Amino acid sequence: MDNAAAAVPDVPAESQHSSGERYWEIDAIRGIAILGMIFFHILAAMVMFHIIEETETFLKFYNTYVFGTAIFVLLAGIAMILRHERMQKRGATDRDYYVTLVNRSFLLFGIAMLITVITWIAYQVFLDTNAAIVFGFLHMLSISMLIAIPLLRFKKWNLLFGLAVMAVGFFVIPCFTSPEWLFPLGIHSAEFLNHTPDYFPLFPWTGVLLLGVGLGNVFYPNGIRGFTLNYKPGKFLQAMAKLGNGMVTLFIYITHMPVIYVVLWIFGSLTGIGYL
């Protein structure tokens, strides 16, 4: 069996090495990425509430959102390597590992489908619009993890697999606009994007996850840091590491948008600034 593992920004102990200490650099990067995501979503919600305008300056922030998301997915791939080693140290079998991976994938997919239902209801009730998050970040991540399972044994070769999937996503998939039921792969019409506020197709994003798996095998072979890091994190990075620590990140990811919407709705109701 190979050095592989389960992972997502929501798994509590993926960043641990064999002594039980977490790899702070993994958590800190994840924490910074979640802050960037929250910042972008606040701006996007303010546009939706007509508090600010969707100008060229605002659209530039979308690039930072894509970059932050890519960091999340890369870390999910790396965490797959770390989790396998951690479970092995506990005496778990390969079967235990794969069962855990599959269970987590289905858990994430269940949460993703719940988000689909909630967003569909919200758009119908508040905006009278037929829209929903039909294939968002968690949809993509859960399925990408399942796709990655048979490829984990190839270790560093996942770098090439990931780049290949990304190349198909960037250069081949955009050539097709139908059939639209293949939207999970990235095949859709331009109109499709008007009905889903959050969209992460498998091409190219599964490639990013596989790239993370390959990088995990390069920098954390056998789930153990393969390089020397002679640096003690300061208070900021320590705080970011706590923010990016496993289940905390998943909780923030699931709850931050409803919180933002409620706060802006209350703000608009009290001040008269903005509207839906």
Image (tube, grey):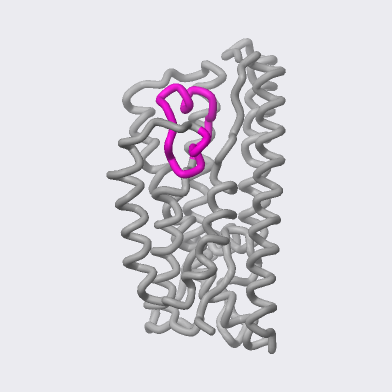
Residue 225, above or below 6: below
Does residue 192 belong to the magenta stretch? yes
Residue nearest the viewer, comparing 100 with 55: 100
* Residue at (36% x, 29% y) in the render: 59
In the picture as drawn, the residue positioned furthest to the top comes out as: 272
Residue 1, above or below 194: below
The answer to whether residue 108 of the structure is visible from this angle is yes
In the picture as drawn, the residue positioned furthest to the left comes out as: 171
* Residue at (63% x, 41% y) in the render: 256
The answer to whether residue 22 of the structure is visible from this angle is no
Identify the image quadrant of residue 161.
Answer: bottom left
Does residue 115 belong to the magenta stretch? no
Q: Position of residue 261 (x, y in %)?
A: 64, 28
* Residue at (61% x, 47% y) in the render: 253
Horizontal side, residue 18 vs residue 113: left or right: left
Q: Quadrant of the C terminus?
A: top right
Q: Position of residue 88 (x, y in %)?
A: 62, 86
Q: Quadrant of the N terminus?
A: bottom right
Q: Position of residue 185 (x, y in %)?
A: 46, 44
In the picture as drawn, the residue positioned furthest to the front comes out as: 179
Identify the image quadrant of residue 129.
Answer: top right
Identify the image quadrant of residue 241.
Answer: bottom right
Residue 95, above or below 64: below
Residue nearest the viewer, comparing 272 with 53: 53
Q: How many marks?
A: 0
Q: Position of residue 74 (x, y in %)?
A: 44, 60
- Magenta-colored span: 181-199
